[in-house]
Amino acid sequence: MTDPVAAREQLASALAKRAGQLALDYYSNRDSLEIETKASALDLVSIADRAVEDLIRDGIKAAFPDDGIVGEEGGAASGSSGYTWIIDPIDGTVPFLMGLPHWCVVIAVAKGSETLVGIIEVPCIGEHFAARKGQGARLNSSPLKLDPSKRINQVLVAVGANDRADRAVVTSIMDGLLASGGMFYRNGSGANMLANVAAGRLGGYIEPEMNSWDAVAGLLMIDEAGGVIQPFAADQAPGPVLGAAPGVWNDLEAIAIRSMGWPDANTR
């Protein structure tokens, strides 16, 4: 009997690659795209976002018509199978439209509140991140395993922010990183940065408020690569996100507690 999660992972991987190629075609012709604003002047969307999400949605409906879908651009469609696909067609639309390479296609599969599959495709550099619950995380088929010896003063820590974020909280996080001997980093795509934590390129990621379609795939990757994460339910409303390499976690969690007023995180 076919493993239903493995079958969905296989489709998610294939769809992410196809969607990444479509997005890359739009990226190569981005000067001709019609751009709209959403909540703020830097909250942008284009026909590329919608076309890429439509490609993914159509592929899911053809293979698993009873699955639910939640997408950043197309909203939510309920299903009866218990499985839900969570999509961000182009995470990092602003970098995408400005000609920067730090954007990605994000697809996750969840059952209830539990994320089972996470795929992040980074077309500009040909990177394909994948994770399945209990089966590890991979970058272009190579297993990812985080180095437990790295400390916060030896790494870059990514900081996410958006138009909803309290500026005082964000600056407090940055100040906390500097005071700890570390340094902050940001490239405009939260999912891309989470994947790079799983790859060991960044020591951690912190954001006061993040949507599930940006967060859950990368958090699964960090967890499966041996990192530590603050639990984030796949079906929850936007909320705080924290993930880090094992040796960075305690210091980063302390910064989150001071800056964001968190209680001590129950991470395991």
Image (cartoon, rainbow, N blue to C red):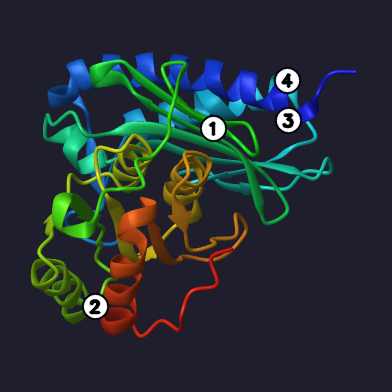
For the question of whether residue 44 can be seen, the reply is yes
Residue position marked by numbered label 4 in the rendering: 63
Residue 7: give x, y in percent of width and height.
72, 21
Q: Is residue 98 left or right of residue 173?
A: left
Q: Is residue 184 left or right of residue 236?
A: left
Element type at marker 4? helix
Residue position marked by numbered label 2 in the rendering: 166
Q: Is residue 93 left or right of residue 155?
A: right
Sooner in the amino-acid sequence: mark 2 or mark 4: 4
Which amino acid type is shown beneath numbered disc 2?
A: Asp
Element type at marker 1? strand
Measure how far apart labels 3 and 1 are at the Cα level.
11 Å
Mark 1 nearby-residue class (10 Å; few <14, some 14–19, many ≥20)? many
Residue 182: give x, y in percent of width and height.
13, 60
Q: Which mark is residue 202?
A: none
Residue position marked by numbered label 3 in the rendering: 5
Q: Which mark is residue 131?
A: 1
Measure how far apart labels 3 and 2 are at the Cα level.
38 Å
Q: Is residue 96 left or right of residue 200?
A: left
Check the picture and name the quadrant holding the C terminus: bottom right
Marks 2 and 1 in Cβ contact (< 8 Å):
no
Residue 58: give x, y in percent of width and height.
61, 24
